[in-house]
Amino acid sequence: MLDPKFLSYLSENYGITFNDKKLVERAMTHSSFDNEHKELGIGDYERLEFLGDAVLEINISKYLFEKFPQLPEGKLTRLRSDIVRTDSFARFAKEIQIDKYLLIGKGEEKQGARQRHTLLEDIFEAFNGALYLDQGNETVDKFLQRVVYPHIDSGEFSEDTDFKTHIQERLQQSGEVEIDYEVIDEEGPDHDKKFEVELLVNGKFLSKGFGYSKKHAEQMAAKKALEEL
Amino acid sequence: MLDPKFLSYLSENYGITFNDKKLVERAMTHSSFDNEHKELGIGDYERLEFLGDAVLEINISKYLFEKFPQLPEGKLTRLRSDIVRTDSFARFAKEIQIDKYLLIGKGEEKQGARQRHTLLEDIFEAFNGALYLDQGNETVDKFLQRVVYPHIDSGEFSEDTDFKTHIQERLQQSGEVEIDYEVIDEEGPDHDKKFEVELLVNGKFLSKGFGYSKKHAEQMAAKKALEEL
């Protein structure tokens, strides 16, 4: 059963009190737990994930549409897909402690599913689907104002994710150069690693970047280099 | 400029009256028209399409979620993607006469863009984006109750689009057979063709199907055969 501490946590930190506690419990439950505890009759998050996926998409789309009135469609679409992806949703899931309170079966637990980004993404979507059904879209939007939009405002996402291609084009304008990305540090536990990457041009340091994946850190290093050139 | 007949059509047939006429005009305008008539300052549908895409996704998702309370997530997802695709949206676009009233430049007109399914899809999305901004989601949902949901209710879409694979498996259970699909008729003008396809097993007629594309008609023939076997 869902730990009541999660419900208190939601209430204290986000002012959210579910009318239908069964609904949020289902959103937090993986099929492996449901299978092991059929007598509880919880069900699993999967159908709620189907709904929540679309709930997140419309709210984030509307936010971007209004926040960036001059941004053309192509850039809006790229920015949206930079937000609506596994790693980002897994981060938001952890921010509201989904990783701590989700319900999974014993086998999955042993295999480390609790920290699997695709699972955290699914449950973040399901949670928003449950919130939408229980309280309507206005509450979802308010919740996202706390959990998602500040990350957009702080510029963590970009409509131009391909900084690596851009910096390569810039650097090779006056002839071939060798461009390397090197991971120089990894911080944090396995399930919450942060990477530090250096961008080297002909073996010389140009910039560095941090990210939640190697690829992300490389893009951040390339972005930094573009700003500095 | 947008033909006022389109606005009357919307009002008479769907009870829709836009507060912001400029918004619906923009939703109906391709960039090629905007470029030829910069002095009108209409803009084009592209940003509205970005928003409308998500608006359609959430409403159709919610409808499916509620209409099929027992359908598992995988089937819901397949059913949704059978609805949320170019050919279906192009059909809905024609149903509300978007093809008749959309604004495109002269060059595009000559190349037949007015009947291009991808363009009709885009404008159907943009139209729903404009409706959402102008009147809120409740009006969009009411509009879809007229234009989209009846097609779902009538079983035109399926959570199991791969009837061809299924019938092949069934037919080959007791050894190899030759399966052919033959187009035997095409009806209607180029931009609104309907196909009739026969499914032949070892050269003998088994079933036939109708569809808005060759592929669709083949699937319908396979579906018919599965029902009859």
Image (spheres, coloured by chain):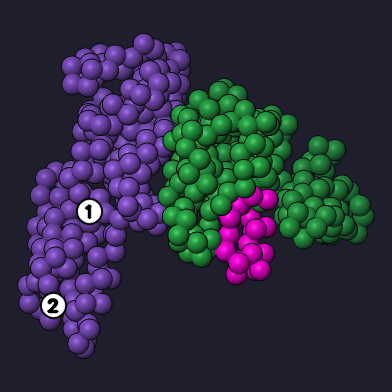
Chain colours: A green, B purple
Q: Quadrant of residue B6?
A: top left
Q: In the rendered image of this protein, does residue A165 appear above or below residue B42?
A: below
For the magenta stretch, what is the residue range? Answer: A100-121
Does residue A169 show up? no
The residue wearing badge 1 is B213
Main SS of residues in magenta: helix
Q: Nearer the viewer, residue B28 or B161?
A: B161
Q: Residue at x 9, y 71 (%)?
A: B206
Q: Residue at x 63, y 55 (%)?
A: A117
Question: Where's residue B226, x and y in %?
Answer: 17, 68
The residue wearing badge 2 is B201
Q: In the rendered image of this protein, does residue A212 appear above or below residue A229?
A: below
Looking at the image, residue A164 sits to the left or right of residue A83; the answer is right
Q: Quadrant of residue B115?
A: top left
Q: Nearer the viewer, mark 2 or mark 1?
A: 2
Question: Where's residue A202, x and y in %?
Answer: 88, 58
Question: Where's residue A129, x and y in %?
Answer: 48, 40
Residue A101 covered by magenta stretch: yes
Which residue type does callout 1 highlight? Ser
